[in-house]
Amino acid sequence: MGEIIMTDQVSTANVEQFYYADGKRIPLTPSHHFVAVRTEAHNGEARMQTANLAQALSAVTSVGEVFEIPDYDLMVVKVAETPTPRTTAIAPPIETVNSFVNTQPELTVGPPVYEVPQAPVTEGLIPVGEILVKFKANVQEELKQQLLRENNLEIRQSNYPEPGTDLVTAPNSQQTVAIANKLHESNLVEYAQPNFVRLAPRLGAGNGYGSAVLSRRDLASQSAGVTAKEVQQKPETATRPLPTAPPTDPGFVYQWGLIKIKAPEAFDISMGSPSISIAIIDEGCDIHHEDIVYKQPGYDAVYRRDDPSPLPRDGHGTSCAGIAAAKANNNLGGAGVAPDCQVLPIRIAYGVGGGWYTSDAIIADGVRTAVNRGADVLSNSWGGGSPSTVITNAFKYAQTDGRGGKGCPIAIATANNDVYGVAYPANLSPTIPGLMAVGASNQWDQRKSKTSLDGEYWWGSNYGPEVDVVAPGVKIYTTDIMGTGGYGGGNYIPDFNGTSSATPHVAGLMGLILSVDPDLRSWEVEDIIKLTVDDLGPVGRDDEFGFGRINCRRALEATSRVWYEISVEPEFIGAGNECFIRINLRMYNSGINTVRLDGLNLISHSPDWNTEIDRFEYRPNPGGIMVPRADHDLRFNQILLKANGNQSSWSYSWSMNWWYTYWRPNSPGLPMSVGELTEAAGVKVMATTVRGSGAFVQPSQPKEAVLGNTLLDNTAVMLNSNGQVGESLVIDLQNKTITIALR
C-alpha cells in the first residue's frame, strides 16, 4: 500500500483505506448506505432540522432514514439500498445527498462513513476525531507527549476504556484514520485505532435496518400450537422426565423455546441461584420491571453512570433480560431459562432509527465494567462487521480476570443476515475459550433462514465455521419495557425474534450451569454445553447448527459429574411369596471430568425408614475410572434386596448413596490421561442420598370407595411411606412391574 495523504477536504474515492485491529489491517470502503451531515444545531432545533432534511431529501433521492447523533453534532442519512456493488467508491444516492447538503447554508458534509467490505453485517463506521492509543509500558512520558504534539493530538481521557489506554482527539475528523495508522506503526505504541462511532443493526430481527415483530394473531396460531404439541410429548428416557412442576406463569404456554431446550426438566435440578448474575450487555434494561430481579448497580457505558435505563423506544435489552432470567411461578409473564439468577444490566448503545448508536470505547468499557461488577455470564445480542482491538481485549479480560480468574462464559449472536459469515465479535469464538457464537433455530429445528417453515421471510441466522450452538430465535415470549415503552405498549412481548433472542437462551443456560457448580472455568461451561446438545443437521458439528441445539437438562446432568439410571421392580419369592426388590443400576459420567466411583451403598428399609432390612455395598480398590467422552459407565444388574410383606400386601423403601473422586480437565476438549490422575489433584465428593419407595395394599372394600371411582381394573393403590397415595409411581398388576422416574 502506498503512503496515505490526508487533508481537511480529502476525497476518499481513490484512496485505499484501512485501519488496524487485533494486529491486522482491516480494509475500509466508503459506505454506500450512510452519509454524515454536520450541524451546529442542538436539541429541539436539531430534531426539527433532521425532520426538514428528511423531507427535503425525499424529493431528490431515495432516503431510508435521517437520524441524530447529538453527542457529535451529526445527522446521518441512511439511503435506500441500491444494486451498486459495495466495492464501488461512492454510490449515486450518496453523491445526491452530498450535493444537496452543499446547497444548505446551515449544513455541511460531515466526516466520511466507512464500511468493511465483504463483512456479513452492514455497519457504518464514522471517524469522529477520536483515537484510542496504548503506549508501550517502557515509553518515557517525554516521548509520549512529543508523539502526541507532532500529530496535534490532545488527551481527553486516560485509562479508558482499559488501563494504559488514552482517548485522544485529533483536530480534524477527516484525518482520524490516517493518524491512528501512523501511531499504530510507531514503535512507541502497542496499538492505536480510531474510536469509531458505530451505526449497527439491532439483532432483534428486522427488515433492512429496522426491527420487526409479528402480530399477536400469528403467535396464537403458530407458537401456541407448537407449545401444546411439545407439552404432550413423552420424555426421552427415564432420567429425562417431564418436569415435576412446570412453571405456573401465564405466559409459559407460549414459551415453546423453553420446552424445546428442556428447561422445565432442568428446573428439577436447578432454577438458578441469586448469587449468579447474567450481564445483559445491550441498549439498557427496564430496571423497574415487575418480572426481573436485578443485580445492582447496573451501568450505562454511553454516559458513564450507574443508571442503565433505556430510552422509551429501546426495548431490546429488556426483552433479552427476560429470556435469560425472568422470574418463575410468580403469576406474571413467562419464565426465563435461569429464573432464580439475577440480571446485571449494562447499557452500551441507544437506538437511532432502526439501529444502534455506539462506539468502540463505549462497548469495551461496558464489557469490562460488567466483569468488574461481578458478572458471572456475559450475554451479547449484538454484533457488526468491524473488529476492534479494545473490544477484543475486553472479552479477553473477561476470561483472564472474570470470576476471580475462572473466566466469564460469554454468549454472542452470529447476526441476522442469513449469510455464510459470522459477525464480529461472535467470530472470536475459536480464539477465546469460553466465548460461544450463537445461531437461531425455529420450532421445526431448522436453522432460521428466510425460507424456513416459521414464515419470517425477512431474516435468517448467519452461519459458518465459528458457530458453536443454536437456540430458539423465533416468536419468543418475553418481557418488554413496562407501560407504553418498548415494542408493544405492554409489559410483555409475545414475538421477539432474531439471534438476539437465541443468545440469552444460551446465557441463561450458562447461569444454570454455574448455579450447580460455581467453580467451573468458563471453557468448562462451554465444553459442557457442546457435549450435551441435541445434534441437528448432519451428524456431528456443522456450519449451520454448530454442535447442535442446547439441552438444559442434559447440561445440568453433566454439570453434576455423576448421574444414574435406576429401575426397581418388586419380586415375590418362596412359598410365602415374600416381597423383594430387583434393582438394575447404571452409574455414568455425563460430564467433562474424569471420575472414579469410590464406593456405593444400596439399602432396603422398613416402611417407617427406621430399620435397615438389607444392603448391597460396592467397595472397589481402586474404584472404576469413567473417562469423559468415552461412554464409560458402571452397571450393577439384578441386585436383589429383601423388602416388606408379601404378594397380598407389600411395600419397599430404598436409599442409595455414593462417593467419588473427580479430576478436572487441563484444557478445553481434552480429558486427562490416566498418568495425570494423582490423588492430590483429585477432588473427593460424597453425593447426596437419594430415596425411593412404593407399596401395594389389598383393598378391604370396593375400589370405588378407596379413590372415589378413579381406579381402573388393572391398577392398584400406590402408597408412600406416610400411607398417602403416591404421585410418581405407576404399577402394572398384570406384569408386576413398577416404573420410577427420579428427578
Image (cartoon, rainbow, N blue to C red):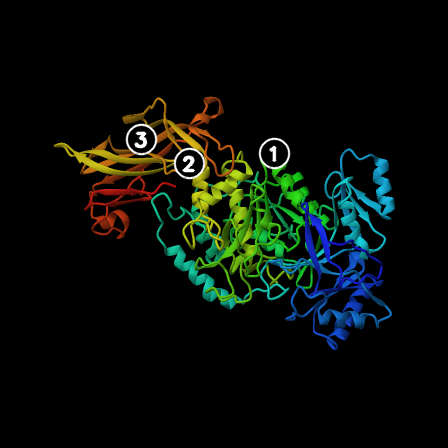
- Whether residue 565 sits left or right of residue 5 in the image: it is left
Tell me which numbered mark, 3 or 2, is placed earlier along the sequence: 3
Residue 332 percent location from the top left of the image? 53, 54
Residue linked to disc 3: 608
Crowd class of label 2 (few under 14; some 14 to 19; many from 20; radius 10 Å): many
Quarter of the figure with residue 631: top left
Tell me which numbered mark, 1 or 3, is placed earlier along the sequence: 1
Residue 273 percent location from the top left of the image? 53, 40
Residue 563 or residue 717, whichever sits in front: 563
Residue linked to disc 1: 405
Q: Which of the image's four quarters has the N terminus?
A: bottom right
Q: Which amino acid type corresponds to the residue marked 1 in the rendered image?
A: Gly
Residue linked to disc 2: 628
- Closer to the observer: label 3 or label 2? 2
Q: Residue at x 40, y 56 (%)?
A: 230
Q: Which amino acid type corresponds to the residue marked 3 in the rendered image?
A: Asp
Residue 412 percent location from the top left of the image? 58, 50
Task: Name the secondary structure under disc 1.
Answer: helix
Q: Which of the image's four quarters has the C terminus?
A: top left
Task: Name the secondary structure under disc 3.
Answer: loop
Residue 666 percent location from the top left of the image? 51, 32
- Closer to the observer: label 2 or label 1? 2
Residue 330 or residue 552, whichever sits in front: 552
- Whether residue 581 sits left or right of residue 79 in the image: it is left
Quarter of the figure with residue 399: top right
Residue 318 or residue 6, whichever sits in front: 6
Residue furthest bottom in the image:
59
- Picture mark count: 3
The answer, for residue 350, to whether it is visible in the render is no
Q: Which amino acid type corresponds to the residue marked 2 in the rendered image?
A: Pro
Quarter of the figure with residue 497: bottom right
Q: Is residue 497 above or below residue 276?
A: below
